Image (cartoon, rainbow, N blue to C red):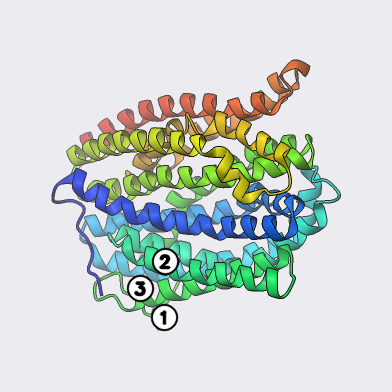
Amino acid sequence: MAKTHDMTEGPLLKNIVLYTIPIILTSILQLLFNAADLVIVGRFKGSLSVAAVGATGSITMLIVNLFIGLSVGAGVTVAHALGAKKDQEVHRTIHTAIPAAIISGIILTVLGISLSTPLLTMMNTPANVLPLSTLYMKIYFAGITFNMVYNFASSILRAAGDTKSPLIFLSIAGIVNVGLNIMFVTLFDMNVEGVALATTISQAVSAILVVIALMKRTDSCRLELRKMKIYRCQLAKIIRIGLPAGIQGSLFSISNVIIQSSINSFGDIVMSGNAAAGNIEGFVYVCLNAFHQTAVNYVGQNAGANKYKRVLRILIICLILVTAVGLVMGGVVYSFGSKLLSIYITDSAEAISYGLIRMSFICLPYFLCGLMDVSTGALRGMGASLAPMIISVLGVCGIRITWIYTIFRIPEFHTPQCLYFSYTVSWTVTFIIQMIAFFFIYKNKKKEI
């Protein structure tokens, strides 16, 4: 099986591109899970079902992101240990991370199932959408442990330089997901419960495959199930790095929940267009966020090896690449917006028009979100997780929530357009402050060598 890839040596631009491409493709496949859900229920069950599935996205992320952050902590901890050539620490981190993933999944199942109805109700989900949204969420969270195991295990593989295996596993799971979606909805005449069940089964497939991959490795990243144990020191480091990232993700989700609640106030047609557009934009976002993951792991290994000149070069390369990808992909997706939206929505031209409004405010300046994410990833890679959390929470969540409760409340600005513009403002401000923080922490780290 693959050996650890040393990110502290060799040419950076070529290696970063080769490392990032599989992450992009893997992330796109993950999104196809939800895209397949929306497309199939939209075509066979109508825009109301699209709205029902879309309404669950922000609230699901609110609950899940706290624990997803811990997978980031596991990856950074492994990357630091690999860069410092500390095999024993790598071994202990991996054998702590997988049990932590299972425990996280169990907690999430309990929270997701018990809180789905009250949270969706609190978000002003329309009465005709609420029952379907609740059913989708409960089934999704029943199998969330598989999602946690996959995220933790794939984070470890990426820290070791293996971005191809998760791509292969997601490809297999994606085929399973689409096949089951079609079978459950068309043959068994199921609605959102069918696509939720298909997603859960496909996530189980990907989780099993990624665990087997770790078990077959021949280096310090090899997983032995009988040796799984919670090591306090490694768990503490995972939590120290991962918890702020998780809190940041959850607080981001709070702002998105508030935004989704504001969208819900415009009715199910706007909700449907917003859900479809958001799913399409997701494909642009994951391509940008791949550079965040690259920055985390490349900076992580080089920071662990105290090679800070390479750390700065990694940041610059990732910023340039994410800008280029964001401008090109954002422009292309917006240009084909109507055709893409019509894949999801077949029974409402008005919903498509509202989807286009969202895309015009999100897609074109999306590279700014990529710049913000890369700077955050570089900070986390250096082990500074608290600073980017505070900056991001204040810069993104603070601006968006303040915007909603001030500017958006003004009658003439109470429009979807005004709501979406808050994204661009928050990305720009946060990126500038993150960069200031990066150079401050970077200089202090170099002095410590």
What secondary structure is found at the residue carrying circle 1? helix
**Residue type marked 3:** Leu
**Residue type marked 1:** Leu
Q: Which mark is residue 81?
A: none
Residue located 58% across and 59% down the image:
36
Placement of 38 over or under 390, stated as above or below: below
Task: Give the residue at the far left of this rendering.
Answer: 10
Q: Which mark is residue 214?
A: 3
Question: Contact, CB < 8 Å: mark 1 with mark 2?
Answer: no
Measure the alpha-carbon separation of dots 3 and 2. Answer: 8 Å
Residue 218 visible in this rendered orientation of the protein:
yes
Question: Contact, CB < 8 Å: mark 3 with mark 1?
Answer: no
* Pick the front one: 217 or 322: 322
Measure the alpha-carbon separation of dots 1 and 2. Answer: 13 Å
Counting residues from the N terminus, which is met first, the one under dot 3 or under dot 2?
2
Question: Contact, CB < 8 Å: mark 3 with mark 2?
Answer: yes
* Pick the front one: 228 or 72: 72
Estimate how packed mark 3 is, as few (under 14), some (14 to 19) or many (20 or more) residues with alpha carbons within 10 Å: many
What secondary structure is found at the residue carrying circle 3? helix
Q: Give the residue pinned by disc 1.
A: 225
**Horizontal and vertical percent position of residue 158:** 33, 59
The quarter holding residue 327 reads top left
Placement of 38 over or under 222, stated as above or below: above
Measure the alpha-carbon separation of dots 3 and 1. Answer: 10 Å
Estimate how packed mark 2 is, as few (under 14), some (14 to 19) or many (20 or more) residues with alpha carbons within 10 Å: many
Q: Give the residue pinned by disc 2.
A: 153
Residue located 69% across and 27% down the image:
404
**Residue type marked 2:** Ala
